[in-house]
Amino acid sequence: MKKTGIIIEFKNGAVKDASYGMIACARNGGGDSLYAFVINEDAQVHKEALEAHGIHNIVDICLPEIGTCKESGSQAGWNPVIWSQAVMEAMQIHGISELFGLTTPMGRELLPRIAAKLDAPLVMDCIEVNCSEGIVQNYLYSGKTLATIKVKGDIRIYGIRPNVIEPAPAPVSASMFTVTYSNAHKNEPDCGKITLLESRPGDNSDGDLLEADVIISGGRGMQNGENFKLLHQCARYLGAKVGASRVAVDLGWVPYSMQVGQTGEKVSPRVYIACGLSGSVQHFAGMKMSGMIIAINNNPNAAIMANCDYFIEGDLFDVIPALTEALSKAK
Amino acid sequence: MKIYVCVKHVPDSAANIALKDSKHIDDNVTLLLNPYDEYAVTEAVSFKKYLNEKTSLCGTDDDTEVIVVSLGKKDAEKTLRSAMAMGADRGILIETEKIEDSITTARLLKAAIEKDGVPGIIFTGRESIDMAGMQTMFRLGANFGFPVANNVVKFTPDITNNSVEVETLTEASGRDLYQLSLPCVLGAGRGLNSPAYPTFPDVVKAKKKQILSVSKNELNIDKPQASTEIIELKLFAGKRTPEEIKGDLSQKITSLVKILKEEAKII
């Protein structure tokens, strides 16, 4: 029987929606025995939620020697070097041949560290996985092509793009296991050569673009950083996160963590609202996978106006405040 | 100290991609140095300067050099020249016609570096913009037994302790701070430095710098048991048919709210 391990991510004490989507992906892909890896969280608390999504086994991974300092925004006791070793231990103990994680900042640290140590194949940013065939799909060449990739190896590792796969509840009952980090890695060649000194959490108010359902982004047309508050006000009523084009970041208006595009975040929200943003090829590389794209721009010839679902030709400084007002009344 | 920088020759992000066949893009597009690798080269060159200043104070010989290594077709020489125009001293091209996966790439890079010298530190970009595998630096580190940090946005050497301190960019502008002993592998992220465009004299000088070509076969690596292979490639245009929301401002807003509510179902 094929055993599939899934690294579960949490946010504010709850399982992230993107993790449920990843479970659905692992299940569709033919995973017949799913193991949820819960690291440094109280696994019992999340048992019911994970069972509801079809998890057969919950592995509580305990890292006793790393305190329990709880920082806002990041999971307790975050340390990618130790966490990746702990996941490898859990994989070995339970005979896991397939590992799933999200292509998030956490996944980008854990999955390649594990793949490198196990000399196992890894594909990041998958939008579809067929476990039984070892075939995945992802976007290559800056989102301009869709690739089908054959993954060969005794152990195969998949990084899943958050938000592209809908959660699909499928209730089962799960068995509980505990794996305690044993420090069995002290003989590894890089042991003791890398130490995490400090983990400074980011600011949640401007982050999380990757997993946002709705994004409202501003470009050069915003004119300055101060004006982004118009987008933040509107975002509050839309339950949206605020993004930006590279120009807005390069001009110092907003932080790099808000950048959507080729060299920023690659996002897949249900709705993407682009304000005063021309829509360069590089910007499209980061958002063309959005469900619906709405453009607001006073230039009818902007590239984005020709490749969106809806557009409003008009001044964003009229449209956005009016939209915010309409939304505030609708509440 | 030998400072190695692994760089990749990738299609320009602004280029339109066409397909040559069902597995490959038409490489008749502009290819250039992977954007994240520019940060890697820049940091390597400034680290060399730092080491030279240190050693000149101690009166020892200066044998520090920056060597750029790339894997690709003959044309990837252009990317090596770009890196040399940015200050790298010489280049190594591992010639291969095939698109290699990360597992094989990391083995070939290790073999080529080992053949050339003993690395004091290895820089890469945090990912390539074509394949975006996000893993070669970790595999390279594991193959050498070196520690790895990726998406590095701050680099502080501590040569007396034979180590470096780095900051990596995490979620929502968060930072993780690591200490790594040398030698190590660092994946450069945006914000690590501000790469400068080479001047014309730099470009001319780079033409005279040495590039050593080695073939994949010469490096004689063990064939890995595991692999990832592209079996099909399709163009993804993501082309949409735009519909204008018309009317005066209040009509536009009414229509927009209706779309958000009834079609997108987000409010």
Image (tube, coloured by chain):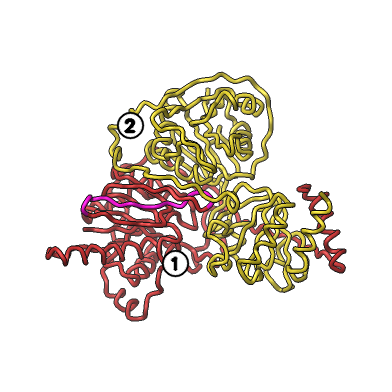
Q: Nearer the viewer, residue A232 or A93?
A: A232
Q: Amino acid at mark 2?
A: His
Is there a contact, CB below 8 Å, between mark 2 and mark 1?
no
Q: Where does the magenta region start and end?
A: B160-172
Q: CA distance from mark 2 to mark 1?
A: 40 Å
Write the residue at 46% across / 52% down. Answer: B169
Tag 2 secondary structure: loop
On the same chain: label 2 and label 1? no
Please identify which colour was used for chain A in the image. Answer: yellow
Where B171 sits versus A154, above or below?
below
Residue A62 sits in quarter:
top left
Tag 1 secondary structure: strand
Q: Which residue is mark 1?
A: B32
Side of A164 where B156 appears, left or right: left
Q: Amino acid at mark 1?
A: Leu
Residue A174 sits in quarter:
top right
Tag on residue A185? Answer: 2
Q: Which chain is red?
A: B
